[in-house]
Image (cartoon, rainbow, N blue to C red):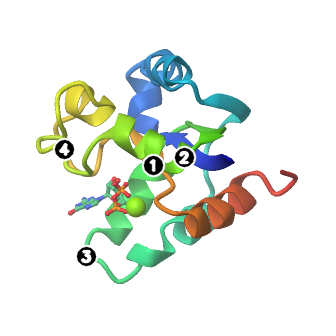
């Protein structure tokens, strides 16, 4: 049973030269790339992507951050790809993320945490549709 997930190397990850590191970790895990594109998000796409957080106090800052430079949008697939990538990414707060995870190894601040990964099959379908409508 293969599954697809939407992954972002966020603008902080791209700016810090961590694209290769992230792609290499997910490929080493066995996930297969289906789509990849470097792009700078318009605010409306960012607001749709993070709609579930629209009432949070950090929403404006999060949208500024995610639109602040180019990000790498990826779709990867494999068995339990959603859970597999969330495990590679680590906890949202990089200080709590285990060493050995992407966030645990490369980040210190909760907002600038290098990667995004869909959190459920419903989110993955919605996010893949938003970033790659032709898939
Ligand atoms: P994720 O699914 O692990 O990415 O975490 P969430 O869905 O809870 O949050 C989405 C994104 O918002 C996170 O990856 C962070 O970039 C950012 N974020 C989460 N919590 C905070 C916070 O308390 N403050 C700020 N500034 N950003 C946050
Ligand atoms: Mg989330």
Q: Are marks 2 and 1 in contact (CB under 8 Å)?
A: yes
Q: Which sits earlier in the primary sequence, circle 4 or circle 3? A: 3
Q: Is the CB atom of the residue marked by disc 4 within 8 angstroms of ligand 1's nearest atom?
A: yes
Crowd tier of the residue under label 2, counting other residues whose Cα lies within 10 Å: few below 14, some 14–19, many 20 or above: some
Residue 55 rendering spot, x and y as whole percentages? 35, 83
| Distance between mark 1 and mark 3 Cα atoms | 27 Å
Mark 2 lies on a secondary structure that is: loop
The residue labelled by disc 1 is 83
Q: Please name the residue that numbered disc 2 is placed on.
A: 80
Percent position of residue 14, x then y: 47, 28
Asked if the residues shown at circle 4 and circle 3 are in contact, with their CB atoms under 8 angstroms apart, the answer is: no
Q: Marks 4/1: CA distance? A: 22 Å
Residue 18 position (above or below residue 65): above
Disc 2 under 8 Å from ligand 1? The reply is no
- The mark found on residue 57 in the picture is 3
Q: Residue at x 35, y 70 (%)?
A: 59
Say the numbered circle drawn on residue 68.
none
Q: Nearer the viewer, mark 2 or mark 3?
A: 2
């Amino acid at each position: 049973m293969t599954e697809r997930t939407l992954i972002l190397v966020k603008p902080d990850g791209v700016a810090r030269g961590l694209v290769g590191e992230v792609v290499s970790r997910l490929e080493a895990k066995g996930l297969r790339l289906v789509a990849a594109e470097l792009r700078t998000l318009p605010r409306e796409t960012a607001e749709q992507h993070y709609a579930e957080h629209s009432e949070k106090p950090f929403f404006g800052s999060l949208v500024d951050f995610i639109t602040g430079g180019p990000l790498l949008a990826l779709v990867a697939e494999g068995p339990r790809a959603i859970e597999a990538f969330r495990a590679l990414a680590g906890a949202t707060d990089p200080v709590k993320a285990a060493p050995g995870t992407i966030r645990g190894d490369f980040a210190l601040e909760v907002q600038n945490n290098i990667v995004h990964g869909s959190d459920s099959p419903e989110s993955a379908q919605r996010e893949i549709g938003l970033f790659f409508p032709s898939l």
